[in-house]
Amino acid sequence: MTQRLSLAGARLREPETPAGRNGFRLTGKHVIVMFALFFAVVLAVNVVMMRIAITTFSGVESETPYKNGLAYNTRLDAARQQAALGWSVDARVQRTDDGHVSVSVEARDKAGRAITDLTGVVRFERPTDKRLDRETAIAPGGAGRYTAELDGIGVGVWEVVVLFGEGGPTEFESRNRIELH
């Protein structure tokens, strides 16, 4: 036997969402609010991270990159002149008991003789933040030895730059990357 059903006058019912133990039912409005809150949190985190990134590092490595590029050949000529001098400079860096950094430098010419009467500076450059750079004059200690002491040099990676000259422009430049503990 076949039964026919008449759908005339029938109303479609909305499917029921099963309710939880406390009677809560997840609806489309809830999903939209959760979606909006998710992206609001993502946006807030991005804004905070951008603010931190912008305020801690300017992004500018050099204030005058064009002029630095033009001076490149001059720096190459200075490096050739330095190589022609044949100087050897041995620098030692160590942290003292009171937290300062002590730099001792020994300078010798081509023949291995001590170079005296040099004027110079030692500069500690932080590769990640130029605002932390420190510089001081190197004091002659006799027999080609020179010393300097700096404070405010933190733990981490530093570029140690030693610059020497005989009363005029820099004739010798040495750059070395070190890690201080």
Image (cartoon, rainbow, N blue to C red):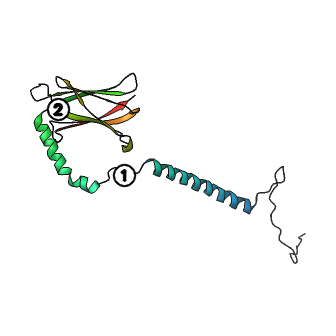
**Dots 2 and 1: beta carbons under 8 Å?**
no
Residue 71 higher or lower than 156, as above or below:
below
Residue at 38 percent of width and 44 percent of height: 131
- Residue type, label 1: Val
Q: Which residue is identified by label 2?
A: 118
Residue at 69 percent of width and 59 percent of height: 33
Measured in 3D between alpha carbons, the distance from the residue under mark 2 to the one under mark 1, in whole angstroms, is 33 Å
- Left or right, 146 with respect to 2, comes to left
Residue 60, label in figure: 1
The percent position of residue 86, horizontal first and vertical second, equals 12, 33
Q: Residues within 10 Å of mark 2 (few under 14, many from 20)?
A: some
> For residue 99, what is the image quadrant?
top left
Question: Residue 97 or 111: which is nearer the viewer?
Answer: 97
- Left or right, 164 with respect to 2, comes to left
Residue 12, label in figure: none
**Pair 2/1: label in front:** 2
Describe the element under mark 1 as helix, strand or loop: loop
**Residue 11 visible in the shown view:** yes
Residue 17 higher or lower than 61, as above or below:
below
